[in-house]
Amino acid sequence: MATEALPASSSIDLPRDGDDLLCADNSESMADISENLKSPSLGLGTPNGYLSGEAKIERAWAHWNKLGQPKYIVAPMVDNSELPFRMLCRKYGAQAAYTPMLHSRIFTENEKYRSLEFTTCKEDRPLFVQFCANDPDILLEAARRVEPYCDYVDINFGCPQRIAKRGNYGAFLMDNLSLIRSLVEKLSNNLTVPVSCKIRIFPNLQDTINYAKMLEEAGCALLAVHGRTRDEKDGKKFRAKWDIVKAVKDSVSIPVLANGNIRHMDDVQSCLEETGAQGVLSAESLLENPALFAGYRTDRGEGGVEEDGNVDQAELVVEYLKLCEKYPVPWRMIRSHVHKILGEWFRLQPDIREDLNKQSTLSFSFLHSLVNQLRERGVRVPLYVKDPCNGP
């Protein structure tokens, strides 16, 4: 069995500097979370191990229907799909969300890693908890720790980054399909919560279809398909292939989600129509505009008008900061979100961005004052909504 390499960015001696510290004392917050997590799980009740293939499919759909068939979903993003950001996206239309990718071995070994990287609350549902792994036993141990608090345990078979190649996980397991199968079977046969998988496509269509069918046979109850290959890392350079997602959807019997090319709600509707998928995942576009699923967009588009209320990216940052005070996370996550949400504002006022970059230690008072500076200068970057006079 292959062994997992420890990512260089995941030292056991956490935290390392100010940006790795929690943004607030989380003792009260975690007590609230612990109390909230006493709500009943929506798990399957018993593992899939004894079920026939047809019964597994029926159970997969029963679970999906029980969750309300969410269509608008926050994709897993390392250091970016943490609890406060998930809750912000849920306020603005997201119907389900993934956690950031968690490293299964570190998650089982290190309590500090678990407390820093995985938090949730009763309102944070439906929830996919995603792990990277290459050892079935370690993955099962990690999954059992989160099983009561989520609706799917997800296995990351889609990460194309070099760290995944060094660690032998993510999309680089596509070279070892027998190991992929053993990971899925291990969870499916032993967990009461369903197993989902997030994948990339092969260059060859039939290889992709065979891959999807194998995952379904192994016990995958939901499949999220990123319509790019492992080598197509740049989403701006390579368009996701919705026709391949549709081919996968037509070849399996479990729910399928589509990932790729989602910039605004027009893309969402087009993707659902062209692929037949049950829902869509958005990642990069949500980082810039967490209100995407509520119909807001960063460009005017066809028939768009400037939003005339209080919703703009500065207001979204303020809302995000309030959620971080309620659900503390490491400052590095907050710094990243502020940069991404206010990217266009900083482009127009680069001196304020430089002031942010100079701060080795952040505080909520500093970040609120930064937003106030942007507003006081009167250079507002609007969000847009579709003009109701132009029809649906």
Image: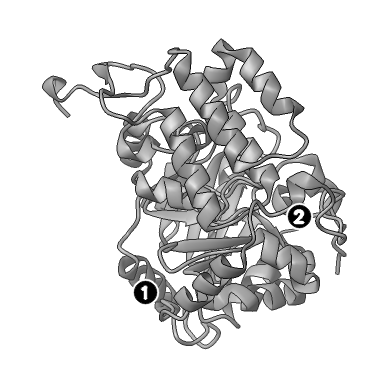
Quadrant in the picture for the C terminus: top left
Determine whether the residue tagged by mark 1 lies in a helix, strand or loop. Answer: helix
Is any part of residue 56 visible from this angle? yes
Compared across the picture, whether 76 is left or right of 246 comes to right
What amino acid type should be assigned to the residue bearing mark 2? Tyr
- Which label number is shown at residue 92? none
Question: In the drawing, does residue 170 fall left or right of residue 334?
Answer: right
Q: Element under label 2?
A: loop
- How far apart are the alpha carbons under marks 1 and 2? 30 Å
Where residue 51 appears, as percent x and y from the top left, is 48, 84
Judging by the rendered image, the residue that carries numbered circle 2 is 169
Q: Amino acid at mark 1?
A: Glu
In the picture provided, is 282 more to the left or to the right than 141?
A: left
Screen quadrant of the N terminus = bottom right
Give above or below for 298 relative to 102: above
Lower position in the chain sequence, tag 1 or tag 2? 1
Picture coordinates of residue 271, whole percent (x, y)? 37, 37
The residue closer to the viewer here, 114 or 168, is: 114
Q: Position of residue 351 (x, y in %)?
A: 65, 14
Give me the residue at 42% from left, 55% from top. Answer: 96
Between marks 1 and 2 in the image, the one whose residue lies nearer the viewer: 2
Residue at 55 percent across and 11 percent down: it is 348
The front one of 245 and 346 is 346
Which image quarter: residue 339? Answer: top right
Q: Quadrant of residue 211?
A: bottom right
Residue that appears at 58% across and 34% down: 367
Q: Which residue is mark 1?
A: 58
In this orientation, which residue lies closer to the viewer: 188 or 69? 69
